[in-house]
Amino acid sequence: MTLSSSPIGKVYLVGAGPGDPGLMTLKGKDLLQMADVVVYDALVSPPILEMINPKAKKIHGGKRRGRHSLEQNEITQTLIEEAQTQAIVVRLKGGDPFIFGRGGEEMGDLMAAGIPVEVVPGITSGIAAPAYADIPLTHRGYSSSVTFVTGHESVGKYRPQVNWQAIAAGSETIVIYMGIHNLSQIIPQLLEAQLSPQTPISLIRWGTCPQQETLVATLETAIEQVEATGFTAPAIAVIGNVVNLADRRLG
């Protein structure tokens, strides 16, 4: 990795939130409007991209399943190089940089290269999408614990490193990021951990965006319903009795 020689700039790891531009933080918006360079992810919504300084250099660094615009090491190297000549370099990441966003890795690499770096948190989809679907992740009568876990541990290959049995036993609400492609491996492990087949699950696609879609099923029926409807990523899964609260509308 190229080491920095007296960089003139600073890299900001900015969370773009889950999609709704109203959920972008004020600090993040200000940085986008002042940025000299913005390296942005694939899942950053168009209305948020429109906030970027029109004079800024825009670089698509997004990664989607099986399709990479830049490899991770290329993204970091780009940030290092841009900080040599530009004052405000924004790495715009979907959701929150430190929640399954590899922000910790990027921060470590930048610091190792001598690049000043600052993190601007964002609202993560695991909180926002259920809220937009009327699902409270915790509720005094239903759930006093919630676990956030990734269901996609490597590109193109599922490696069962997550201890699903421990998660099933230790949390009343489970929120799975990037797990749609691996439900057929995940759900059997949850059932083996003695979760009831009737446990409700909600799959929320494009959370907080105008095209948000929700599929509600049980652990017993979810895989079949996903296949029947063609429900695909990007989506999160919420598992637990709190899912049933989405049917309730308080007047």
Image: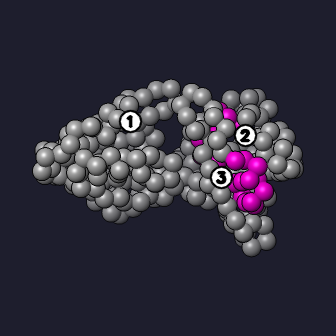
Where does label 1 land, which residue? 72
Tell me the CA gap for discs 3 and 2: 12 Å
Instruction: Determine the residue positioned at 46% across, 47% down.
Output: 101
Pick whichever, 29 or 38, lies toward us.
38
Kind of residue at disc 2: Ile
Instruction: Determine the residue positioned at 53% across, 46% down.
Output: 210
Pick whichever, 153 or 179, lies toward us.
153
Tell me the CA gap for discs 2 and 1: 27 Å
Q: Which residues are magenta?
A: 163-183
Mark found first going from the N terminus, 1 or 3: 1
Q: Quadrant of the N terminus?
A: top left
Q: Is residue 171 magenta?
A: yes
Pick whichever, 16 or 157, lies toward us.
157
Name the residue at the bottom extreme. Answer: 140
Callouts 3 and 2 close, C-beta under 8 Å: no
Mark seen at residue 165: none
Can residue 200 be seen by looking at this rendering? yes
Q: Quadrant of residue 25?
A: bottom left
Q: Callout 2: 10 Å neighbours few (<14), some, many (20+)? A: some
Kind of residue at disc 1: Gln
Kind of residue at disc 3: Val
Can residue 247 be seen by looking at this rendering? no
Mark found first going from the N terminus, 3 or 2: 3
Q: Residue 172: x and y, percent? A: 75, 61
User: As drawn, is 22 to the left or to the right of 155?
Assistant: left
Where does label 2 land, which residue? 186
Where does label 3 land, which residue? 175
Callouts 2 and 1 close, C-beta under 8 Å: no
Q: Is residue 170 magenta?
A: yes
Q: Callout 1: 10 Å neighbours few (<14), some, many (20+)? A: some
